[in-house]
Image (spheres, rainbow, N blue to C red):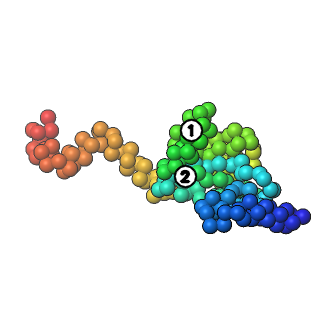
Amino acid sequence: MQRYLSVVALLLCLLTTSGTRGSSSARKISRTPMAVGALSGLRIGLEPHLLEFHGEQCDHCEAMKPLFRRLFLETRLVVKRHMVWEDTANFRLMSIYDLKSRCRGLPFFYNRRTGQTICGATTWSNFKNWALDRNCKSSSPPRMTGEQQEDAREKKLEQDPLFSRLKKGLGGDKEATPTTMDEYK
């Protein structure tokens, strides 16, 4: 039955674009969520209710990409992705969905069924709960790797004014380095 519905959806898409084969509108219509959903085994006419807003060179957005594939393989759910840095319409859409949560960051995830949001990168279990319409945390960052923790510690130390004075005293700044005991007083 599912295969039959997918074939019917494909034929409907072809019929709606048959008059404008060479135009760009035909290519746009053939990539509509209905056509993509029907071809991937989803129900006809249902647009994905899971939305992600991301930036092109956003490290946190890139870190979330493997979770989309895993989600699809385990649950057959699709997350519709929207690029916001170069598309003002997508940015406006994100702003509307973000009114309540006030995330104002990327990636931003919105579930249209439940209204739940996730701000930033998150863990697999939190992401899966969000996708399956279960309770999730709006901010649940994944654990940092050892290298990321070390970078964070160094950054925190560099912002500490005492550390910067100690660094100068250890030879970072020749003028601030005392040479005799009298200069320490």
Element marked by disc 1? helix
Q: Position of residue 39 (x, y in %)?
A: 75, 64
**Can the viewer see residue 18 in this picture?**
yes
- Seen at 13% across and 49% down, the residue is 174
Q: Which mark is residue 104?
A: none
Q: Position of residue 167 (x, y in %)?
A: 25, 47
Quadrant assignment for the N terminus: bottom right
Quadrant assignment for the C terminus: top left
Q: Is residue 142 left or right of residue 173?
A: right
The residue tagged 2 is 83
User: Mark 1: which amino acid?
Assistant: Ser
The furthest residue to the right: 1
- Seen at 61% across and 53% down, the residue is 81
Q: Nearer the viewer, residue 1 or 162?
A: 1
Q: Is residue 174 left or right of residue 67?
A: left
Q: Earlier in the sequence, mark 2 or mark 1?
A: 2
Q: Nearer the viewer, residue 15 or 154?
A: 15
Vertical comparison of 164 with 100: above or below: below
Element marked by disc 2? strand
**Can the viewer see residue 135 in this picture?**
no
**Dot 2 alpha-carbon crowd within 10 angstroms: few under 14, some 14 to 19, many 20 or more:** some
User: Mark 2: which amino acid?
Assistant: Met
Q: Which mark is residue 95?
A: 1
